[in-house]
Image (spheres, helix red, strand yellow):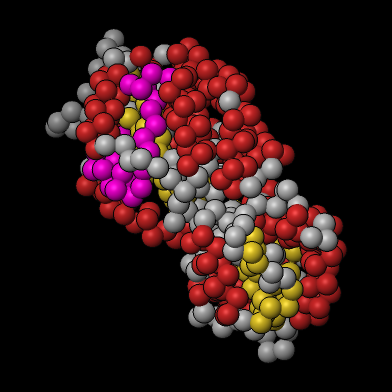
């Protein structure tokens, strides 16, 4: 895609700073009107967005709607229902030592925000944060990914038609454009992408003490205990790993499986992939392709790191990779140290010989970077015990992916998988500053706080 010139980026940034200073975005009725405009745009541009997702990712309309468009529309509707309540001034308890004062907590927008998104869910991951920015009363510059040029172009056209550039604008381009954006002084940066690039974002933000939300990724483990319902486990994992062809930040990345159920799982997984996508998965219109040749070469390069026990078919011309299970993988190999972001599944078999399966799982997971997601299949009580002794951004017991689908619960990473959270009220909070105001009456002025601190013994007891 053609890079937005740096002077244009600077101009947009200055325009938005000037617009924010007018105070126009502080009015809740203005924010709700803008949310309604975005909702209307999503409905008007739904077909074009879906067509672009098919062109760039081979993503079917059904999957595009379920995993992208419906999520954004649902987020907008939730903010329209609740933004009055979230933005309202709230009175909190004031201790007797502050008498005769009252205390209120108020919400104010952080200001001019920058939202940078990746290519794997290019509609949802760009526009969902925008909902929070609008709801909180911020302006926003949106930077979509150049790896999905058709989607990025449609989004730019949609935003340009819907909003004034001084309020919400789109800039396009590669990492040179990112560098120019990060040179500007923002009041908030919301970044979704890789941990490596997030370090660059955070370093740039640190120069101006700019707050950031970082939604990253990592290697999300999937635990299959011997108590797991193998049929259900295989079905849910086949769905979760083939959704967007594994190009999902919270996709299960590798499997730790009890040796007693490993053989049954491999057989069931193969059957469930066929049930979902047909005997020839390459012919299924619901099966997404790798985003570009570089991604195809990277993911197929993992095949050499172990022994393929299911799948392995590829087609470079269409960037098709069949769901693939690989065993006998070295723990220091790229397959086990890099986020896969594709339909390749390494399997590590564990037993109960010298230590319990549960303890081995815990040791393995905590020895690595904190993942964005954690998945356990087996007895629920065992799952909760392992959850309590490990850390991740979020997760599921006896399921995958679905924790992101509850718009009433926060989503975010921890450690190497990110910081901050969003969705629903947390999106509003991410773009807001919480401000405490104490209002003290003047009808009486107690002398205890003033020097020379008379009656200090009594004051000490009160405190």
Quarter of the picture containing the N terminus is: top left
State whether residue 119 appears in this view: yes
x, y percent for residue 98: 33, 26
Residue 165 falls within the magenta-colored stretch: yes
Q: Is residue 153 left or right of residue 302?
A: left
Q: Nearer the viewer, residue 50 or 10?
A: 50
x, y percent for residue 381: 75, 62
Magenta highlight range: 163-187
Q: Is residue 77 left or right of residue 209?
A: right
Name the residue at 28% across, 28% down: 12
Please identify the residue farthest to the front as the structure is shown. 317
64 relative to 36, above or below: below
x, y percent for residue 185: 24, 37
Q: Is residue 235 left or right of residue 33?
A: right
101 relative to 293, above or below: above
x, y percent for residue 346: 64, 73
Task: Tally the numbered discs.
Answer: 0
Please identify the residue farthest to the left as the structure is shown. 452
Q: Nearer the viewer, residue 232 or 432?
A: 232
Name the residue at 56% across, 73% down: 302
Quarter assignment of residue 432? top left
Name the residue at 38% across, 60% down: 196
Name the residue at 40% across, 35% down: 142
Please identify the residue farthest to the bottom as the structure is shown. 354
Quarter of the picture containing the C terminus is: top left
Residue 374 falls within the magenta-colored stretch: no
């Amino acid at each position: 895609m053609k890079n937005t010139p740096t002077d244009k980026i600077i101009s947009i940034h200055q325009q938005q700073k000037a617009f924010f200073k007018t105070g126009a975005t502080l009015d809740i009725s203005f924010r709700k009107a803008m949310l309604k405009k975005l909702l209307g745009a999503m409905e008007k541009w739904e077909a074009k967005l879906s067509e672009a997702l098919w062109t760039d990712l081979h993503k079917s309309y059904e999957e595009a709607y379920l995993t992208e468009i419906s999520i954004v529309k649902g987020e907008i509707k939730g903010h329209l229902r609740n933004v009055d309540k979230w933005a309202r001034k709230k009175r909190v308890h004031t201790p007797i030592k502050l008498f005769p004062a009252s205390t209120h907590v108020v919400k104010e927008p952080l200001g001019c925000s920058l939202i940078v998104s990746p290519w794997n869910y290019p509609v949802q991951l760009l526009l969902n944060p925008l909902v929070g920015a609008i709801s909180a009363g911020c302006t926003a510059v949106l930077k979509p990914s150049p790896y999905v040029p058709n989607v990025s172009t449609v989004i730019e056209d949609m935003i340009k038609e819907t909003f004034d550039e001084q309020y919400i604008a789109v800039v396009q381009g590669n990492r040179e454009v990112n560098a120019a954006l990060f040179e500007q002084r923002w009041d908030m940066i919301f970044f979704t992408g890789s941990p490596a690039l997030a370090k660059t974002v955070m370093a740039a933000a640190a120069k101006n003490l700019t707050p950031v939300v970082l939604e990253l990724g990592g290697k999300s483990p999937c635990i299959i205990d011997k108590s797991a319902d193998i049929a259900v486990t295989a079905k849910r994992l086949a769905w979760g790993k083939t959704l967007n062809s594994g190009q999902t930040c919270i996709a299960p990345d590798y499997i730790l499986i009890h040796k007693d159920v490993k053989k049954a799982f491999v057989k069931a997984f193969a059957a469930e992939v066929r049930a979902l996508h047909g005997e020839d998965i390459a012919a299924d219109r619901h099966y997404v392709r790798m985003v570009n040749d570089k991604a195809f070469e990277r993911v197929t390069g993992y095949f050499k790191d172990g022994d393929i026990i299911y799948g392995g078919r590829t087609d470079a011309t269409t960037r098709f990779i069949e769901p693939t299970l690989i065993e006998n993988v070295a723990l220091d190999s790229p397959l086990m140290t890099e986020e896969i972001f594709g339909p390749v599944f390494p399997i590590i078999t564990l037993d109960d010989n010298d230590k319990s399966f549960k303890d081995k799982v815990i040791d393995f997971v905590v020895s690595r970077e904190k993942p964005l997601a954690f998945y356990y299949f087996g007895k629920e009580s065992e799952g909760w015990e392992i959850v309590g002794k490990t850390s991740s951004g979020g997760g599921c017991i006896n399921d995958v992916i679905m924790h992101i689908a509850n718009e009433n619960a926060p989503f975010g990473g921890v450690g190497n998988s990110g910081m901050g959270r969003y969705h629903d009220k947390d999106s509003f909070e991410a773009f807001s500053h919480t401000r405490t105001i104490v209002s003290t009456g003047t009808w009486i002025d107690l002398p205890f706080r003033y020097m020379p601190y008379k009656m200090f013994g009594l004051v000490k007891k009160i405190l």
